[in-house]
Image (tube, rainbow, N blue to C red):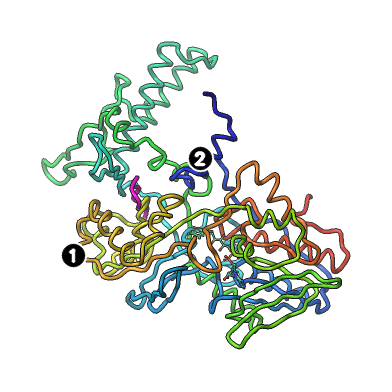
């Protein structure tokens, strides 16, 4: 049966490896910084902002510069929303589970939400610079990490260095294409000279030998390292292509997307000491504006403005403002009373969010560095773990925190159905298949399933071509006096840049309305 691109995209976004596959297909976009220089004054118009995540705080920060009065209602006792790092003493609670407190050592942390900034997310980096948040390189690509396929294939159930599979597959692909060109099986209108140049290129790219065959090279690493004297070093034979395929190592869980996909290409960056330092720096710029522990319960457009109802530990309250910026994630907003139109209401109810989970595991020894020479990067598996992230900070330190799983969709649903201890057991049981050192070095864990976390109920908005055209568009214009804002209102889902871009767009739209200027973000010029 032929499959349309749309069916394919829909299926792919549902697939277990949806996120990397979506990246591979360009469904999650990159973010340039656009000009943003607004003039005129908001003259104290009162803007009520729902949510003190990056979008809410960036909106308040920019609006305050323009003379608006901002009040942010934030349900949690902290700012930052999804921009959240877990440290000693961090507490969280998921629906149907008791609260948990992180018992990491002082100075240890992991990023439960964002962990990497693409070098071309200019706006995120702009705010890091403006807010004086130091950044460092995040090592997203590491050929020394592993592929671990659970299954029945001959290469299954053993850890294999990424560099072996990458170079073997690249080599075999080059050899196959070279043979096809030699046999005139490639219909690309190449002259004989051009064909020869392509073959030369393939020899270099794939590491083919003089006979244009792929045999092993040191690109895939050594089984005996070269050294002094007679120690020449030894390389192993390549893995057999059929065995690689039969073992599932060419399936989506193991696609080599990170090397190529725009969003994951090196250089990637992270905030030094935890990504939530970006949120903390933003919070400092808007002193006194956030009311914490204020859970919004209803949002109503009125004749001249908005009325927001919320509850906190002193009871139920009402706040009136001129305009409202609503950054509440849609699965949460869906359970909040409002008087929006039916189209808007339907969009809020039906735009799906990805299920995603992470666990931080603290170890008393950085065995991945000491024993296995892994400094940052990601090990990929096809089991529930999906990925193990090695820290790109404090190299050669004493202890460290790994992200023991970072998974999506069905795999995330499976772990989010477990309690904290069961998740830890699963992470350790599956992780020790790759790193037996887990047994003697594990100390403590902290897990999060975003789909079960109150005030988020999901990782990020998941769009396909269909709901982009319909549901998304219903939320683009303001609903009378309410502006929907946040990563879900952009093509930069799953990125902090989405929150920042969206904030700038809303600030521009509000300023255009209040000051009666014809301005837009991004400007069309
Ligand atoms: C697992 C994960 C990994 C990610 N990885 C990356 C990455 O590597 N790089 C990157 O750039 N981005 C990444 N992101 C995306 C990034 O974190 C988000 O795009 C961004 O933080 C969203 O900001 P926001 O302000 O739109 O939403 P949020 O941060 O969700 O803010 C919404 C706010 O509304 C509050 N709220 C909710 N309900 C109520 C209510 N009833 N009353 C009052 N307040 C309420 C919430 O508490 C929250 O503070 C990741 C996200 C996740 C979940």
In contact (CB < 8 Å): disc 1 and disc 2: no
Q: Which residue is mark 2?
A: 12
Looking at the rendered structure, the secondary structure element under dot 2 is: helix
The quadrant holding residue 206 is top left
The residue stretch that appears in magenta: 377-384
Place of residue 426 in the rendered image (x, y in percent of width and height, measured from the top left): 29, 58
Is residue 336 one of those drawn in magenta?
Answer: no
Q: CA separation, marks 1 and 2?
A: 39 Å
Instruction: Identify which residue is drawn at 24% across, 69% down.
Output: 364
**How many marks can you see?**
2
Task: Indicate whether 317 appears above or below 247.
Answer: below
Q: Residue furthest right?
A: 516
Q: Which residue is mark 1?
A: 440
Q: Nearer the viewer, mark 1 or mark 2?
A: 2
Task: Give whichever of discs 1 and 2 has the lower sequence position.
Answer: 2
The quadrant holding residue 331 is bottom right
């Amino acid at each position: 049966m032929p499959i349309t691109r749309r069916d394919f995209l829909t299926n792919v976004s549902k697939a277990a490896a949806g996120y990397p596959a979506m990246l591979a297909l360009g469904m999650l976009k990159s973010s340039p910084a656009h000009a943003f220089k607004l003039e005129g004054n908001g003259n104290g118009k009162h803007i009520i902002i729902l949510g003190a995540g990056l979008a809410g705080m960036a909106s308040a920060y920019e609006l305050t510069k323009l003379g608006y009065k901002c009040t942010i209602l934030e349900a949690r006792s902290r700012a930052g929303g999804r921009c959240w790092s877990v440290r000693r003493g961090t507490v969280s609670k998921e629906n149907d589970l008791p609260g948990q407190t992180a018992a990491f050592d002082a100075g240890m942390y992991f990023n439960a939400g964002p962990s990497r900034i693409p070098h071309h997310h200019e706006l995120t980096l702009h705010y890091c610079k403006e807010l004086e948040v130091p950044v460092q390189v995040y090592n997203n690509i590491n050929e020394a990490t592993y592929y671990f396929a659970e299954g029945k294939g001959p290469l299954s159930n053993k850890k294999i260095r990424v560099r072996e599979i990458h170079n073997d597959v690249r080599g075999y692909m080059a050899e196959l294409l070279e043979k096809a060109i030699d046999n005139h099986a490639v219909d690309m209108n190449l002259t004989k000279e051009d064909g020869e140049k392509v073959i030369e290129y393939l020899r270099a790219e794939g590491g083919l030998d003089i006979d244009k065959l792929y045999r092993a090279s040191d690109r895939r690493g050594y089984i005996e390292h070269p050294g002094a004297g007679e120690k020449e070093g030894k390389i192993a034979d390549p893995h057999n292509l059929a065995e690689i395929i039969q073992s599932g190592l060419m399936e989506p869980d193991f696609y080599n997307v990170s090397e190529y996909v725009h969003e994951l290409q090196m250089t990637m960056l992270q905030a030094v000491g935890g990504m939530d330092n970006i949120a903390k720096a933003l919070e400092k710029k808007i002193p006194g504006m956030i009311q914490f522990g204020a859970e919004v319960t209803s949002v109503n457009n009125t004749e001249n403005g908005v009325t927001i109802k919320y509850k906190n530990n002193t009871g139920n309250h009402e706040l009136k403002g001129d305009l409202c910026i609503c950054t509440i994630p849609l699965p949460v907003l869906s359970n909040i009373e409002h008087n929006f139109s039916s189209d808007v209401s339907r969009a809020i109810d039906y735009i799906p969010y990805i299920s995603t989970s992470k666990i931080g595991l603290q170890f008393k020894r950085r065995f991945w560095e000491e024993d296995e020479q892994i400094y940052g990067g990601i090990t990929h598996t096809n089991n529930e773990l999906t990925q193990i992230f090695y820290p790109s900070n404090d190299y050669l330190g004493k202890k460290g925190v790994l992200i023991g799983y970072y998974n999506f969709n069905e795999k995330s649903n499976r772990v989010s159905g477990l309690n904290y201890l069961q998740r830890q057991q699963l992470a350790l049981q599956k992780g020790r298949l790759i790193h037996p050192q887990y047994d003697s070095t594990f100390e403590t864990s902290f897990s999060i399933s975003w789909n079960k976390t109150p005030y988020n109920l999901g990782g990020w908005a998941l769009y396909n071509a269909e709901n982009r055209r319909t549901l998304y568009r219903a939320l683009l214009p303001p609903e009378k006096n309410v502006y929907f804002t946040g990563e879900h209102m952009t093509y930069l889902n799953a990125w902090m840049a989405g929150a920042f871009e969206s904030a700038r767009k809303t600030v521009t739209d509000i300023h255009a309305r209040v000051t009666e200027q014809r301005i837009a973000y991004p400007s069309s010029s």
